[in-house]
Amino acid sequence: MLEFRVWHNSLGAAECEPGPRLWVGLAAEGGSAPQQLSWVAEDGIECAVAFSPDMAACWGHRRVASAHLVQIRGELVASDGFSLAGSSILEYDTETLGMGWHSAGRLRLLLDDGSGVPPCWVAWRDQAGTAYSLGMWSPELSGESHVIRIAGTQFTQASVFSGYRNAAGHAPVGFRGTLVAPSVVKPAPSEPVVLQDVPVGTPCLPSVESVPLIRTDFGNDEAWTAAVREVTEVRTLPNGDIFSASVDVVDDKRFSGLTATQLCQLAPPGAGWSLPLVADWITMMEPEHPVLVVDLDEDSLGRTFRATPYAVHEIEPNLSLANVDWESFEYSADDDGVVRPSFS
């Protein structure tokens, strides 16, 4: 996993501006470090970068859905397997097609340019000359249900990719994979968050009385219902202690696809809450439905950590009343980067 400090240069601009950091992790069985990498995110953003042989620098371009194009330049600041980023690693069981399908080991993929939006297409060429192209499919991306019925039998559809692998000097072969699970890795201490521009015309968040739980992914109503139930329910421990979170649900498609750094800028004037909660695509995909807890403090606006709904029962009242500081929760995350309840 590689972490790059990135600068953006808009067409015609005289100077570069700092942008969000770029995290890249590609680990295919038998593969080597990437030489070139391109991807398209679910929100339509396109990126392409090329790396120096020592992986110390990268150059490329990024185009948002509105066709605004910027050149990007990055320099390596960290390299540590897959253990540094605060993003979701996609891990697949893969197969190649020869005389039938054969196991090709695990593929681990991490791509995060600061938007928090997962890719729907990825292609790269490694330093050994092997080319890969993957098209991702998931019920969330397609709008289909996780559950289908065929001839009266119920099946759960898995998230998959389909594509090809082309080793240098050989014919391309079919390449496919089934998602094992996205695992959220523990964030490292970072520089101040770079806030992303909010799309023109996006409304402020509603003036709710309690902490808002904001839905940004609309591909799985069943997972959303489960997440809401778990966040809002009252939990009684065996010793009689009661935990609950004061939360108002915000289910509005005008906030679809927005990131934490965009949402934190949409707090209405005079909001009586100090943190919003975000239910994004990871919330919907993970069995524990971990949500993003977002900081609204002026000096650390937009920083986040991820927490399970039951942990929110402890986090919301303690942060709202300033009984516990942000770092105490952030650094209590498990090795996968998720904060879980201290009482079960």
Image (spheres, helix red, strand yellow):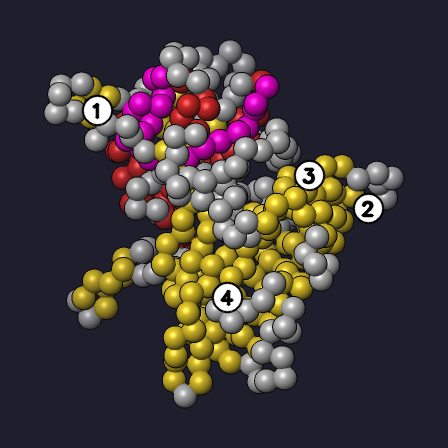
Q: Picture quarter containing residue 171?
A: bottom right
Does the segment drawn in magenta span residue 310?
Answer: yes
Q: Residue at x 41, y 62 (%)?
A: 92
Secondary structure of residue under mark 2: loop
Q: Earlier in the sequence, mark 1 or mark 3?
A: 3
Q: Position of residue 233 (x, y in %)?
A: 23, 27
Indicate the position of residue 42 as horizontal and vertical percent values: 53, 52
Mark 2 or 1, nearer chain start = 2
Depth check, front residue: 144 or 4 = 4
For the residues bearing labels 2 and 4, Cβ distance under 8 angstroms: no
Q: Which residue is mark 4?
A: 28
Dot 4: what SS? Answer: strand
Q: Are marks 3 and 2 in contact (CB under 8 Å)?
A: no
The answer to whether residue 51 is above or below residue 309 is below
Query: What residue lies at 51% left-to-right and 80% top-to-bottom?
Result: 173
Is residue 306 shown left or right of residue 221?
A: right
Report which residue position mark 1 lands on: 234
Dot 1 falls on a residue whose secondary structure is loop
Q: Amino acid at mark 2?
A: Leu
Q: Disc 4 vs disc 1: Cβ atoms closer than 8 Å? A: no
Between marks 3 and 2, how big is the CA–CA gap? 15 Å
Residue identified by numbered label 2: 11
Q: Amino acid at mark 4?
A: Ala
First in sequence: mark 3 vs mark 2: 2
Disc 4: CA contacts within 10 A as few (<14), some (14-19) or many (>=20)? some
Residue 19 badge: 3
